[in-house]
Image: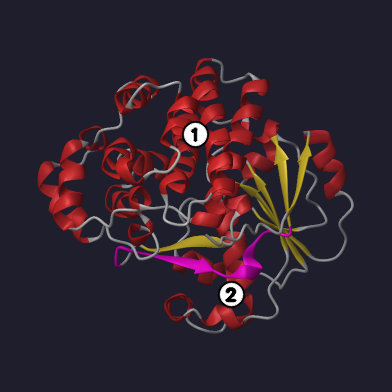
């Protein structure tokens, strides 16, 4: 079977002081994307940079349009933040050439694929979960119409990714759990995805092994930098895996949960993991190795781990979803490139059954 592994990114593991020294090396027009809180907490010297210091969560096309119209074209973008900040950097990189056009039309028509003047950028994650520093795509939302768009181009891999464990240390318990579960979803979905291969499964298993051990530990000791470093590496390995395989049914079902109910992405993706795992099980390769990294005898052991680490909170009812909302979720739960990347392509009846099982 032929397969390709491609992540053309330079990765650097720094401590905070080393990162600050790197920042001082840049000249020219640099756009620095980071929230005011991140800049002040870590005392970043951004005086020579063009700064975008808004707090960004789930960027929509209106925000992208506004930013493209107000910034000067940078020579380089440095995005320090969660997946949303890094996604925004990718959107600016790919769409700045078309800033006088309608952003929503650009997303629908994928005009950016012809861009030969994308802006180079560096991704610096502050959460251990999204894997955005490893991928060539970004999510931009249209909340007006309950739609989600992906910007996806080979030139959108970051030029560099900086791994700085200290930057993840300000996450509270809820965000630590959500982002850890997001990374675990990336690893598990990559493992059973249609393009899964021996190389990506090794990365996915390493990610699962690390997160399975260290997510409970870091939740019990949020200030432990060693645990934070391990979680960052667990997320990194998951990012390398799913950047080559993409995600599957769990992510497809997660998008309406975020759009309709504001459920944070990590919880929305993880909430169906065990139910989808059960339905995919007969198609999963190297089942014995998968169970081994979990230290599990069967799928029930894995399900118990999720229940324990989340305090049994991975239920739709815990997030304000009502039973009567499920049919509306089902209508929006099939995303091309995600649902059809699953070894089993679920129809609406099966999706409804999955959602009822996690209610």
In this orientation, which residue lies closer to the viewer: 320 or 250? 250
Q: Do residues under tags 1 and 2 come within 8 Å of each other at their CB atoms?
A: no
Most extreme residue toward the top is: 220
Residue 32: x, y in percent? 71, 55
Q: Quadrant of residue 295?
A: top left
User: On residue 180, which mark appears?
Assistant: 1
Is 303 or 28 nearer to us in this picture? 303
Q: Estimate how packed mark 1 is, as few (under 14), some (14 to 19) or many (20 or more) residues with alpha carbons within 10 Å.
A: many
Secondary-structure class at tag 1: helix
- Residue 252, percent across and down? 34, 55
Q: Is residue 157 magenta?
A: yes
Closer to us: 155 or 267: 155
Residue at the image position 40 percent from the left and 22 percent from the top: 296
User: Can I make out residue 82 in this image?
Assistant: no
The answer to which image quadrant residue 69 occupies is bottom right
The residue located at (25%, 60%) in the rendering is: 332
Q: Is residue 200 left or right of residue 299?
A: right
Q: Is residue 207 above or below residue 342?
A: above
Sort mark 2 into few (<14), some (14-19) or many (20+) by Cα contacts within 10 Å: many
In this figure, which residue is indicated by the disc labeled 2? 95
Q: Is residue 338 magenta?
A: no
Residue 206 in the image, given as x and y percentages of width and height = 58, 34
Looking at the figure, which quarter contains the C terminus?
Answer: top left
Q: Can residue 101 be seen from the camera position used here? A: yes
Q: Position of residue 23 (x, y in %)?
A: 83, 49
Q: CA distance from mark 1 to mark 2?
A: 30 Å
Q: Is residue 116 above or below residue 304?
A: below
Q: Which stretch did the figure color magenta?
A: 145-159
Mark 1 or mark 2: which is in front? 1
The secondary element bearing badge 2 is classed as helix
């Amino acid at each position: 079977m032929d397969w390709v592994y491609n992540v053309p990114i330079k990765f650097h593991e720094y401590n905070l002081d080393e990162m600050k020294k790197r920042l001082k090396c840049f000249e020219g027009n640099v756009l620095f994307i980071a929230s005011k809180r991140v800049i002040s907490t870590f005392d970043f010297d951004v005086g020579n940079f063009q700064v975008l210091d808004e707090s960004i969560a789930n960027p929509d096309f209106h925000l992208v349009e506004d930013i493209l119209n107000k910034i000067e074209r940078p020579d380089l973008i440095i995005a320090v933040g969660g997946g949303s900040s890094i996604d925004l950097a990718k959107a600016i990189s790919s769409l700045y050439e078309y800033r006088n056009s309608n952003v929503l039309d650009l997303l629908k028509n994928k005009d950016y694929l012809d861009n030969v003047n994308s802006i180079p950028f560096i991704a610096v994650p502050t959460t251990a979960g999204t894997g955005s520093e490893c991928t060539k795509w970004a999510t931009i939302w249209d909340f007006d119409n309950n739609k989600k768009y992906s910007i996806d181009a080979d030139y959108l891999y970051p030029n560099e990714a900086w791994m700085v464990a200290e930057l993840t240390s300000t996450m509270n318990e809820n965000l630590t759990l959500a982002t850890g579960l997001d990374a675990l979803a990336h690893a598990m979905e990559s493992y059973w995805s249609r393009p899964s291969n021996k190389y990506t499964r090794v990365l996915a298993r390493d990610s699962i092994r690390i997160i399975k051990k260290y997510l409970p530990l870091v939740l019990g000791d949020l200030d432990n930098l060693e645990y934070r470093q391990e979680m960052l590496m667990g997320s990194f390995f998951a990012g390398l895996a799913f950047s080559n395989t993409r995600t599957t049914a769990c992510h497809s079902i997660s998008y309406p949960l975020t759009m309709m109910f504001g459920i944070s992405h990590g919880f929305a993706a993880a909430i169906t993991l065990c139910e989808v795992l059960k339905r995919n099980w007969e198609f999963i390769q190297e089942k014995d190795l998968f169970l081994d990294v979990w230290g599990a005898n069967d799928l029930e052991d894995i399900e118990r781990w999720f229940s324990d680490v989340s305090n049994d909170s991975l239920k739709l009812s815990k997030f304000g979803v009502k039973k009567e909302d499920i049919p509306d979720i089902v209508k929006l739960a099939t995303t091309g490139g995600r649902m059809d990347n699953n070894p089993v392509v679920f129809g609406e009846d099966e999706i409804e059954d999955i959602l009822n099982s996690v209610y």
